[in-house]
């Protein structure tokens, strides 16, 4: 489609939707991505953004009833994104939060591309960072147009009018609700300039707000994909080859077809699915199948081989991701050296709602009802499988019952579409917990090898950091850039908070062919923060220095990092001595545009039993939209990471994942979960991310606390691998 036809199509859509819905329809963009000529064209057309070829397009609709709808490209998956987005808009539009509703955006890579992630997606703790400017601009623009409409109706100067809570007030006690003004406002030219509120003018932003999605989740009205019913739908469930890369050789479905409720048995290249009137019948049908698999070349691979290969790779040079100073000279001239090797295990996402997708494939189109972080990829995948055009695939995005990065992938959507195209009715594919856990896209296993050059006082003059592991980026987009560096894998490591005269970071790509890999909550910052923060802690103890003081002395160029470190230490009573067998550990990092520090206090009990007494976090995430969401995300992210740090590891035997359910992939239980104290640093800086920050800090803080309490320095998670258990 040409650019011109695309513009006409979008303009037609906007006018059409305005006519159908009634009222004022706006979109906004990130101005730094739009050439002046394009912005001028859009202004001349009388619409903000309808001719924009790229950028953020959060459409704002003010209805005749005065209610406001935001069509958001950021999906609600429990992180509070919709509430924050509604608050940003309501603040500048001058409406009550209760009068704002949020709808998920349809797939449109051109319109809804995230400027940070570079594609339409929800993830990477980017929702607030990305939406902050354009959503406020959209609200301010709509407010000004409505004020101008009222002023024109009353024949007064707009400067004499003011908007409050969905009403424009004018001289002589005049007033008009937004709903009365939207038709006139939609005909007015865009304001030449927009002045956003300053923080001291905020009435809503920065105040605790209840999540707008909570009531329906509490009363049961909220529908996740797993809850959906569409006309004529049957339930489907599947079994895929237990070894990644294997295929289906044969299947005898005669017994399965005799199970009451079973309708069809569908075969795919590497899987078999059963459709039935209910999930139980699906599972009984699957159990009745007699399947013969071709397990393929990965059937001989087990975890010890993967571990050995990765350890060996970590000693190679790989490619240079960062180089400053002269590390070789620093090591040669050093008074002493310190070396350490850290390992991080394969991890499963295992969200509460397993992979689920409703699909209906027809000759003229395809409908998907699915909770996905990447609606464009879902649409493109369905189009590719069915042979339909992308515009013939409609994605109805649903609330997500947990994702943690898993729904950035779309393999389960592809499977649902492949099944649905072989039957004449809609199907709701539900993976069992066992299928979900053994056919995940896993957080890679990593090995970090660090060597520091130390002066006579034990202060690092520089270090070399080798990172070995799979490339999620290459798996996701098909290849690495010409540099050969996976930017996600080396994030934080190439720019640590600590002043180093020399720093070299090497990336060594080592792929585990036996399982696919993907992003996991915390992504690259989590991966590197663990190695860097454990290493700096070991250097502090090696130098006989207090870990907090040692860090502070190396962080002069990062006052915000110093501030959260000091605050966390103060709130955790860092300077108060603890009895023998107890210890505190700390970690600090700059992650997702925020600065965070976490302290773990624990005590040893019984034979390798541990009791976590306190978890304290301090965060500077810039301007805070909703403090309630910040607290919830740090608490939830910290406990999510704590569960993984204590218990979680995916292991392979003869090509097959051994952990099949939560009895072997254990989660933190309520009685084991400590309280999480969260302290927010007041800030006027641009907003940073929050959803993954807590997860990124808990692992190193826990390992450092264990070393302080027990004297044993572990360098591999989870702790259960070394025999430690919570009591």
Image: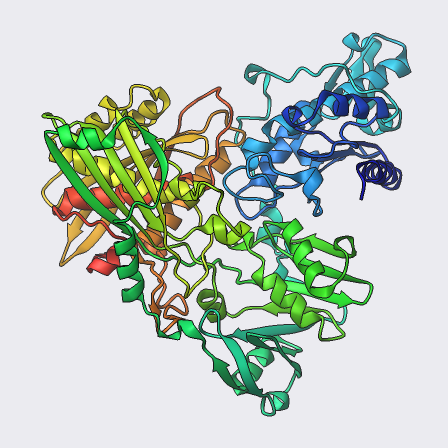
The quadrant holding residue 74 is top right
Give residue 75's position: percent from left, percent from top.
61, 45
Q: Nearer the viewer, residue 538 or 693?
A: 538
Does residue 639 sit above or below 81 in this rendering?
A: below
Q: Is residue 576 visible?
A: no
> At 55% from the left edge and 41% from the top edge, which residue is drawn?
80
Q: Quadrant of the C terminus?
A: bottom left
Q: Is residue 581 visible?
A: yes
Rendering coords of residue 191 (x, y %):
78, 17
Q: Nearer the viewer, residue 417 or 188?
A: 417
Q: Tell me which residue sits at (79%, 37%) in the image.
A: 3
Residue 689 in picture, x, y percent from top left? 48, 35
Quadrant where the N terminus sits is: top right
Is 311 situated above or below 591? below
Q: Nearer the viewer, residue 450 or 683?
A: 450
- Comparing 112 with 427, the one in front is 112
Q: Is residue 377 left or right of residue 390?
A: left
State which quadrant residue 27 falls in.
top right
Q: Quadrant of residue 197?
A: top right
In the displayed structure image, the side of residue 284 where residue 678 appears, left or right: left
- At 48% from the left and 42% from the top, the residue drawn is 482
Q: Position of residue 205 (x, y in %)?
A: 57, 26
Side (left or right) of 124 relative to 166: left
Against 604, residue 579 (above or below) is above
Instruction: Report the number of discs.
Output: 0
Left or right placement of residue 214 versus residue 531 in this view: right
The chosen color scheme is rainbow
Measuring 45% from the left and 30% from the top, which residue is drawn there?
Answer: 593
């Amino acid at each position: 489609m040409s650019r011109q036809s695309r513009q006409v199509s979008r303009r037609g859509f906007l006018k059409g939707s305005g006519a159908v819905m009634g009222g004022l329809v706006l979109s906004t963009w990130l101005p730094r991505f739009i050439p002046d000529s394009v912005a001028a064209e859009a202004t001349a057309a009388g619409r903000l953004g309808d001719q924009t070829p790229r950028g953020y397009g959060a459409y704002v609709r003010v209805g005749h009833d005065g209610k406001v709808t935001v069509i958001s490209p950021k999906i609600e998956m429990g992180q509070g994104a919709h509430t924050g987005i509604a608050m940003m808009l309501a603040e500048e539009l001058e409406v009550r939060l209760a009068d704002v509703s949020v709808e998920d955006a349809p797939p449109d890579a051109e319109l809804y591309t995230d400027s940070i992630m570079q594609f339409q997606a929800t993830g990477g703790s980017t929702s607030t960072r990305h939406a902050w400017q354009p959503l406020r601009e959209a609200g301010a623009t709509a407010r000004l147009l409505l004020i101008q409409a009222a002023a024109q109706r009353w024949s007064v100067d707009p400067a004499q009018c003011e908007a409050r809570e969905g009403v424009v007030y004018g001289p002589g006690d005049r007033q008009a609700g937004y709903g009365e003004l939207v038709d006139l406002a939609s005909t007015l030219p865009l304001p030449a300039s927009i002045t956003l509120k300053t923080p001291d003018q905020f009435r809503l932003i920065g105040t605790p707000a209840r999540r707008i999605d909570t009531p329906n989740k509490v009363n049961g009205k909220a529908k996740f994909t797993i809850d959906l019913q569409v006309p004529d739908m049957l339930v489907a469930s599947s079994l895929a080859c237990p070894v990644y890369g294997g295929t289906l050789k044969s299947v005898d479905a005669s017994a399965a077809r005799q199970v009451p409720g079973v309708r069809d048995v569908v075969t795919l290249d590497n899987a078999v699915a059963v459709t039935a009137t209910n999930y139980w019948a699906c599972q009984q049908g699957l159990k009745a199948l007699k399947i013969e698999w071709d397990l393929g070349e990965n059937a001989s691979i087990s975890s010890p081989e993967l571990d050995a290969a990765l350890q060996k790779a970590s000693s190679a040079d790989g490619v240079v991701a960062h180089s400053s100073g002269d590390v070789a000279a620093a090591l040669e001239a050093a008074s002493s050296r310190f070396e350490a090797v850290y390992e991080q295990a394969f991890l499963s996402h295992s969200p509460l709602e397993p992979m689920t997708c409703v699909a209906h494939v027809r000759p003229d189109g395809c409908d998907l009802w699915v909770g996905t972080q990447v609606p464009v990829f879902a649409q493109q995948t369905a189009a590719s499988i069915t042979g339909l055009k992308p515009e013939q695939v409609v994605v109805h995005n649903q609330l997500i019952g947990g994702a943690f990065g898993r729904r950035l992938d779309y393999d389960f959507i592809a499977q649902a579409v492949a099944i649905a195209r072989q039957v004449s009715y809609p199907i709701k594919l539900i993976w069992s917990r066992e299928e979900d856990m053994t056919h995940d896209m896993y957080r890679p296993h990593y090995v970090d090898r660090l060597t520091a050059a130390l002066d006579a006082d034990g202060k690092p003059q520089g270090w070399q950091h080798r990172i070995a592991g799979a490339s999620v980026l290459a798996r996701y987009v098909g290849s690495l850039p010409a540099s050969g560096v996976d930017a996600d894998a080396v994030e934080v490591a190439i720019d640590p908070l600590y002043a180093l005269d020399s720093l070299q970071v090497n990336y060594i790509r080592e792929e585990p062919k036996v399982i696919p890999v993907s992003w996991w909550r915390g992504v690259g910052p989590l991966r590197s923060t663990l190695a860097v923060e454990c290493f700096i802690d070991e250097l502090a103890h090696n130098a006989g220095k207090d870990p907090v003081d040692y860090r502070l002395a190396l962080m002069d160029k990062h006052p915000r990092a110093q501030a959260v470190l000091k605050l966390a230490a103060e709130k955790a009573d860092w300077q108060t001595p603890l009895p023998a067998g107890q210890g505190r550990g700390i970690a600090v990092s700059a992650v997702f545009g925020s600065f965070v520090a976490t302290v773990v206090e624990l005590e040893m009990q019984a034979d390798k039993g541990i009791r976590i007494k306190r978890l304290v976090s301090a965060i500077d995430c810039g301007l805070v939209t909703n403090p309630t969401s910040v607290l919830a995300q740090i608490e939830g992210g910290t406990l999510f990471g704590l569960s993984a740090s204590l218990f979680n590891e995916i292991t392979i035997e003869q090509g097959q994942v051994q952990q099949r359910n939560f009895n072997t992939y254990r989660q933190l239980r309520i009685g084991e979960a400590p309280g999480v104290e969260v302290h927010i640093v007041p800030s006027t800086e641009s907003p940073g991310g929050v959803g993954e920050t807590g997860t990124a800090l808990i692992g190193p803080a826990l390992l450092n606390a264990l070393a302080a309490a027990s004297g044993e320095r572990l360098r591999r998670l989870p702790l259960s691998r070394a025999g430690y258990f919570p009591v």
